[in-house]
Image: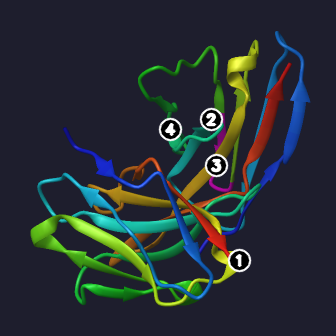
Amino acid sequence: AQSVTQPDIHITVSEGASLELRCNYSYGATPYLFWYVQSPGQGLQLLLKYFSGDTLVQGIKGFEAEFKRSQSSFNLRKPSVHWSDAAEYFCAVDPYSGNTPLVFGKGTRLSVIA
Amino acid sequence: SAVISQKPSRDICQRGTSLTIQCQVDSQVTMMFWYRQQPGQSLTLIATANQGSEATYESGFVIDKFPISRPNLTFSTLTVSNMSPEDSSIYLCSVVSGTARGKTQYFGPGTRLLVL
């Protein structure tokens, strides 16, 4: 079945440490790929997106993500985490390139400790 | 990008009552979606609301429970009818905006609903 998988429900990292959040999808073609962040009590904010081209995409707040076709993955990374990055992160897929609603993963909750 | 506002931002309601949530966009958009996010969960699509046509509901959601209006290209409402505590969730409005090269979905701040 077509799906988006975020295997890590909860991750805790120390402030200043690097971060990688995993996302895998199971769609036949290369879909559009997105990462959103939801801070406590807030709506969803777009971090970055991949449509085509360069497989390493840069986003806001120092985040980047790499699309790997062979692994059907779109992992989110940040070299140095700040306490304000503590939030829920959602990977999302648009399987039909802009004409249908996104399919979301279950989310990964990031906690940041001093 | 698109800037989306929702009203109310939060509400506490009694079971059996109804609440209408408003979604306003700062630009004209064709595609608009309503999502539900139950506590600690991911987003679940309720329906797609395109201007000029009836809303399309996802499996498990029906028009009698979640009637939607889309009177123009910048506005929509979602009503949660005959509420029960199970309806306590965040309800999010979302729109698609962008060029032919790539369209992006943007979200409103959400409406936090607690049903007692």
The reply to whether the C-beta atoms of the residues labelled 4 and 2 are less than 8 Å apart is: yes
Left or right of A100? Residue B113 is right
Marks 2 and 3 belong to one chain? yes
List the residue tagged with mark 3: B93
Name the image quarter holding residue A51.
bottom left
- Compared to A10, does B79 lie above or below? above
Name the image quarter holding residue B107.
bottom right
Q: CA distance from mark 4 to mark 2?
A: 8 Å
Q: Is residue B41 visible?
A: yes
Q: Name the mark nearer the viewer: 3 or 4.
A: 4
Chain assignment, label 1 = A
Q: Amino acid at mark 4?
A: Thr
List the residue tagged with mark 4: B44
Which residue is at 78% across, 41% downward?
Answer: B112
List the residue tagged with mark 2: B38
The reply to whether the C-beta atoms of the residues labelled 2 and 1 are less than 8 Å apart is: no
Q: Amino acid at mark 2?
A: Gln
Chain assignment, label 2 = B
Q: Name the mark nearer the viewer: 1 or 4.
A: 1
- Earlier along the polypeptide chain: callout 2 or callout 3? 2
